[in-house]
Image (cartoon, rainbow, N blue to C red):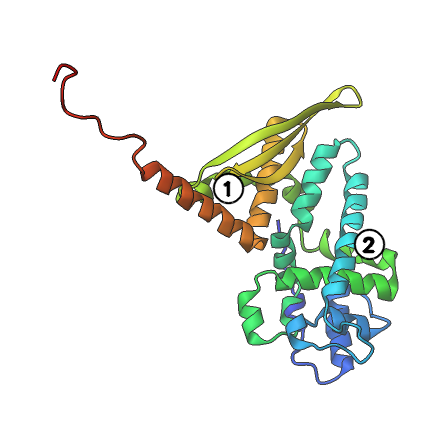
Amino acid sequence: MFVKSNILDRIRLPFRSDRELVRSISLILGFYPHDIKYYKQALAHKSMTRKGGTGGCEHNERLEFLGDAVLESIVSDILYRRYSDRREGFLTSTRSKLVQRDTLNKLATEIGLERLVRSNSHSMSHNSYMGGNAFEALVGAIYLDRGYDACMHFMRDRILKAVINIDKMAAKEVNFKSKLIEWAQKNKLQLEFRIIEERRENNSTPVFVSRTIIEGLDGETGRGYSKKESHQQAAKATLQALKQDKDWVRAIFDAKTLRTAEEEEPVALVPEATTENQ
């Protein structure tokens, strides 16, 4: 699904001047940036920056927010035109595969972007999403620097044509439900998939909404045109939430501890070993 790229071999580190940064960025983008400040910000993890004198953030989180929205719009546009005969469910699923964090992390590594991110060593070793976050921030920087068309050129011609095999990615089946079930079984957790809504879209197409329930606690929901698809989407959202929400994970294991303690307690007094006539 990923095509080997030779960009990485041509990137020089460290940067001694903006000229070297411009060169490295242009190798990734396929064009020269107009204003290098956006790209400096895109490559700055918050662990390496401070509040500016005007109160504005110098790290890449705001660009990441912007890039996430632009990236979803562009990928939607590309898929809509490429797969003109496919239904919404296929397009949504394929877009999700292309913009999910694991894919963006691999992209950042493949094009050499991950090597350019400025961060302290502790943050780099403990943040598995740093590359993907920087990729989104890069898209945000392109949008501010060169506009939507430049973002489209970058994603369509530099990424989806040169780095990712989009058709193989679209055909890839990721069984999120199996992954979640395996995680629950390893941790001896009670897991349930429950259909919470069933309706017909435009009076014809059935739509299902599922929710995961772990140790009696409501999890995430997923929507699909079949029960199976809705389960997969709910499982995917739940796996993402488990990665990000440590308080929820703690609550799940607290609920498990309470359940197992109750199961181990005697439910009734042991009867006397005597007959009724005695």
The residue most toward the top is 277
Amino acid on which the number 1 mark rests in the picture: Leu
Residue 183: image location, x then y, percent = 46, 44
Q: Which residue is mark 1?
A: 180
SS type, badge 2: helix
Side of 1 where 20 appears, left or right: right
Pick the front one: 4 or 63: 63
The answer to whether residue 226 is seen in the rendering is yes
Q: Residue at x 31, y 39 (%)?
A: 264
Q: Residue at x 49, y 52 (%)?
A: 250
Q: Residue at x 72, y 59 (%)?
A: 136
Q: Which residue is mark 2?
A: 152
Near mark 1 (Cα within 10 A), the count class, few <14, some 14-19 or many ≥20, is many
Residue 251: image location, x then y, percent = 50, 48
Side of 251 where 60 appears, left or right: right
Res 47 quadrant in image: bottom right
Pick the front one: 270 or 28: 270
Q: Are marks 1 and 2 in contact (CB under 8 Å)?
A: no
Q: Residue at x 80, y 54 (%)?
A: 70
Res 55 quadrant in image: bottom right
